[in-house]
């Protein structure tokens, strides 16, 4: 039988300083794509907000200053050198960036791109943190102030005979993300992330940050019979310590390859796409075993008190 396989890479990035010139960042990203291609990868996943620092860690009041971090002309103005390398090496890539639309809407976005142009776009749905500064917190997480909630659903696109789904960072902690992708037949979920070691307001989970990162992605992979490619922006970025742990995870829930540093690192694995089909035929046969008619609407009892003095 004609086995469907794909060699994929998670491209982990070390820190990107706030002042990093764009051409230097792009040079790094292009070099990493070549490293991945040299290892046989034809599909690569870069982290969330891969072109800049993770700027939601800082309060920026001036809109023009803030907009310096957003892309207006993706992909051609933003990632042209990566597209040229992708064309040369026959690679498709997924990359996260901040998007400003012509109407001025702001999103935390990821796009699937090949050497010919953009194939699909996803805008992050689960935005963690706050709209307003938390003066007592050791670092800020202002995604609710800097981005609108994504309005493109969870897209699934055929790439190199694989059905590829997209999600971004905090989305990976929510089972709905993987399920909505799986219900569309996704075989790979691409997830770039920026995750600080410390969680302001809940220090008791700091010792669990690495564990809960892999736990979320491994559970999502197993319970939905899909591969997950998680790509981190890691290391100490402008004083905020972020985890690495970039990983490629099989539908069995097993990590088949992972990063060992908190720096630029390429993690490569061969992906057997038919493994999804085998799991979906047996253990997780949605048609035969799911009972959607019994999965009612969310109960008000699920909603804990909101402990913070501001709107959600
Ligand atoms: N970028 C992003 O979504 N980061 C969050 C930080 C933790 S919020 C509890 C994440 O889920 O990794």
Image (cartoon, rainbow, N blue to C red):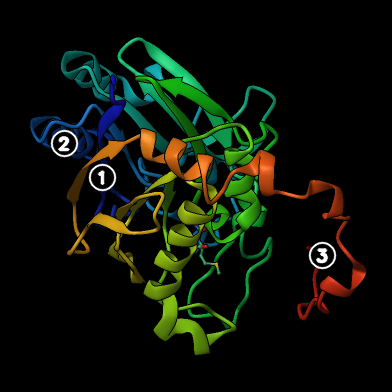
Task: Identify the disc placed on residue 11.
Answer: 1
Give the answer, above or below, for where 63 lies relative to 209: above
Residue 194, position as x, y percentages in the image = 41, 58
Residue 64: which quarter of the image?
top right
Q: Dot 3: few (<14), some (14–19), or many (≥20) neighbours within 10 Å?
A: few
Residue beneath label 3, please?
311
Residue at the top extreme, as displayed: 116
Residue beneath label 2, please?
36
Side of 21 relative to 28 (left or right): right
Dot 2 or dot 3: first in sequence order is 2
Asked if marks 2 and 3 touch (Cβ < 8 Å), the reply is no
- Mark nearest the camera among 1 and 3 is 1
Using the rendered image of the protein, determine whether residue 80 is visible from the camera's viewpoint.
yes
Side of 219 relative to 152 (left or right): left
Asked if marks 1 and 2 touch (Cβ < 8 Å), the reply is yes
Residue at the bottom extreme, as displayed: 204
Residue at the left extreme, as displayed: 38
Residue 108: which quarter of the image?
top right
């Amino acid at each position: 039988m004609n086995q469907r396989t794909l060699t994929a890479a998670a491209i982990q990035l070390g820190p990107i300083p706030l002042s990093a010139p764009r051409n230097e960042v792009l040079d790094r990203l292009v070099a990493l794509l070549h490293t991945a291609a040299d290892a046989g990868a034809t599909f690569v996943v870069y982290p969330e907000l891969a072109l800049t620092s993770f700027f939601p860690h800082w309060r920026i009041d001036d809109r023009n200053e803030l907009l310096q971090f957003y892309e207006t002309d993706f992909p051609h103005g933003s990632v042209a050198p990566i597209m040229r390398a992708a064309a040369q090496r026959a690679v498709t890539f997924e990359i996260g960036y901040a998007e400003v639309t012509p109407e001025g809407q702001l999103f935390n976005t990821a796009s699937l791109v090949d050497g010919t142009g953009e194939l699909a776009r996803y805008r992050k749905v689960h935005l963690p943190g706050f709209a307003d500064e938390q003066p007592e917190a050791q670092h800020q997480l202002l995604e609710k102030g800097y981005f609108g909630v994504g309005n493109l659903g969870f897209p699934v696109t055929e790439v190199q005979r694989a059905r590829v789904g997209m999600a971004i960072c905090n989305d990976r902690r929510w089972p709905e993300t993987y399920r909505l992708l799986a219900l569309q037949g996704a075989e790979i979920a691409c997830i770039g992330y920026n995750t600080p070691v410390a969680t302001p307001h809940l220090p008791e989970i700091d010792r669990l940050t690495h564990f809960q990162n892999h736990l979320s992605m491994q559970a999502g992979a197993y319970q939905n019979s899909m591969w997950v490619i998680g790509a981190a922006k890691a290391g100490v970025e402008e004083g905020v310590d972020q985890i690495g742990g970039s990983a490629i995870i099989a539908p069995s829930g097993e990590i088949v390859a992972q990063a060992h540093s908190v720096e630029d690192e390429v993690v490569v694995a061969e992906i057997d796409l038919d493994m999804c089909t085998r799991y979906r035929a047996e253990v997780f046969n949605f048609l035969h075993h799911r009972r959607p008619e019994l999965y009612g609407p969310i109960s008000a009892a699920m909603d804990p008190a909101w402990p913070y003095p501001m709107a959600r």
